[in-house]
Image (spheres, rainbow, N blue to C red):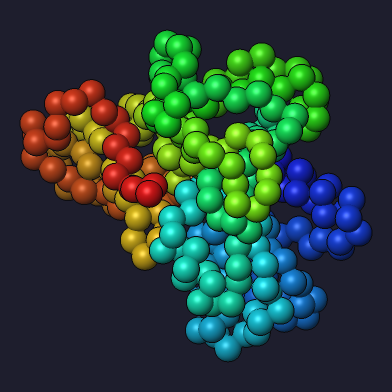
């Protein structure tokens, strides 16, 4: 029950495809459903598709019916695309938001993401609204007057980073291309398809007064998102803080207690250490 789920389900029904809604979690039950229903196409986050395919192999549950995937909500580095292909699924990615609907999509040319015809996209310098030079990385700002949006949106600041890709796609589509999702303009970031905000880290610190400072580091291991909350404290309290981290962010993560004064003095509450090239 997510905006992206509603959008892709409606699109599938429009071309006559039956849809089995599943969501994330309950991996083994989903594998049983895949074995019985034999769907050909997966739509969702690429990281969960990888989990399904690898768990299916581990448990001996068939996933060979899956041949194609439409993925989004998180980064799709080339290494993860290659892993999914090796597991039998060719994927394309799309980019959009709950407010705007579809913004851009990949074609089989796999060279950037082509802007949807119903949106106007600007790339601006974060915090200013001023357009950057072509090819420079900046914040994606979108205007939608019709199409997938329920109501018009004028210069909606997505908070996402990207850049215009020069030239025309080899597939023949002539609309402007962007390089895809390249991170967040602010410190808010996505982990396993869910937003994590500095305000959530502040909530965790407020629940544990023994924490002097905290910094969430987001990384990637085997193309799966990871997060480690580093806390400055004189007490061994990693287990208790890990429970609070999961409660507040709805995601599991590690907690590492570090010495007082050891975290970088750079103003960052969330440090995204992943690469998007």
Nearer to the camera, 218 or 237 = 218
Quarter assignment of residue 229:
top left
Nearer to the camera, 238 or 9 = 9
Q: Is residue 241 visible?
A: no
Q: Image point 79% across, 63% down: which residue?
A: 20
Count of marks, rendered view: 0
Horizontal and vertical percent for residue 18?
A: 87, 62
Judged left or right of residue 257, residue 48 is: right
Q: Image point 83% across, 47% down: which residue?
A: 10
Quarter assignment of residue 260:
top left
Q: State whether residue 25 is above or below residue 98.
A: below
Q: State whether residue 63 is above or below residue 120.
A: below
Horizontal and vertical percent for residue 170?
A: 60, 52
Nearer to the camera, 222 or 134 = 134
Horizontal and vertical percent for residue 52?
A: 57, 71
Most extreme residue toward the bottom is 60
Judged left or right of residue 33, residue 73 is: left
Q: Image point 47% across, 16% down: which residue?
A: 131
Q: State whether residue 201 is above or below residue 75.
A: above
Quarter assignment of residue 154:
top right
Nearer to the camera, 125 or 37 = 125
Q: Is residue 144 visible?
A: yes
Horizontal and vertical percent for residue 46?
A: 54, 59
Judged left or right of residue 82, residue 227 is: left
Q: Image point 43% across, 40% down: which residue?
A: 182
Judged left or right of residue 262, residue 238 is: right
């Amino acid at each position: 029950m997510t905006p992206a789920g509603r959008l892709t389900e409606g699109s599938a029904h429009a071309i006559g495809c039956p849809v089995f809604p599943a969501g994330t979690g309950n991996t083994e039950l989903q594998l049983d459903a895949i074995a019985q229903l034999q769907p050909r196409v997966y739509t969702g986050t690429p990281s969960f598709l990888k989990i399904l395919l690898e768990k299916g192999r581990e448990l001996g549950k068939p996933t060979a019916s899956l041949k194609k995937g439409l993925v989004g909500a998180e980064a799709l580095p080339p290494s993860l695309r290659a892993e999914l292909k090796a597991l039998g699924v060719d994927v394309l990615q799309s980019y959009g938001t709950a407010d705007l609907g579809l913004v851009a999509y990949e074609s089989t040319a796999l060279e950037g993401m082509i802007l949807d015809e119903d949106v106007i996209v600007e790339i601006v310098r974060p915090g200013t609204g001023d357009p950057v030079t072509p090819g420079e990385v900046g914040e994606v700002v979108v205007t939608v007057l019709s199409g997938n949006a329920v109501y018009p949106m004028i210069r909606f600041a997505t908070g996402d980073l990207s850049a215009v890709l020069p030239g025309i796609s080899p597939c023949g589509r002539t609309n402007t291309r962007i390089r895809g999702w390249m991170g967040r303009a602010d410190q808010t970031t996505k982990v396993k398809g869910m937003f994590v905000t500095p305000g959530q880290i502040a909530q965790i610190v407020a629940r544990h007064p023994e924490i002097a400072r905290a910094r969430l580091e987001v990384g990637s291991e085997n193309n799966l998102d990871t997060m480690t909350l580093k806390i400055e404290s004189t007490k061994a309290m990693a287990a208790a803080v890990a429970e609070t981290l999961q409660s507040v962010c709805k995601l599991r993560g590690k907690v590492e207690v570090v010495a007082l004064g050891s975290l970088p003095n750079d103003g960052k509450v969330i440090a995204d250490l992943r690469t998007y090239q």
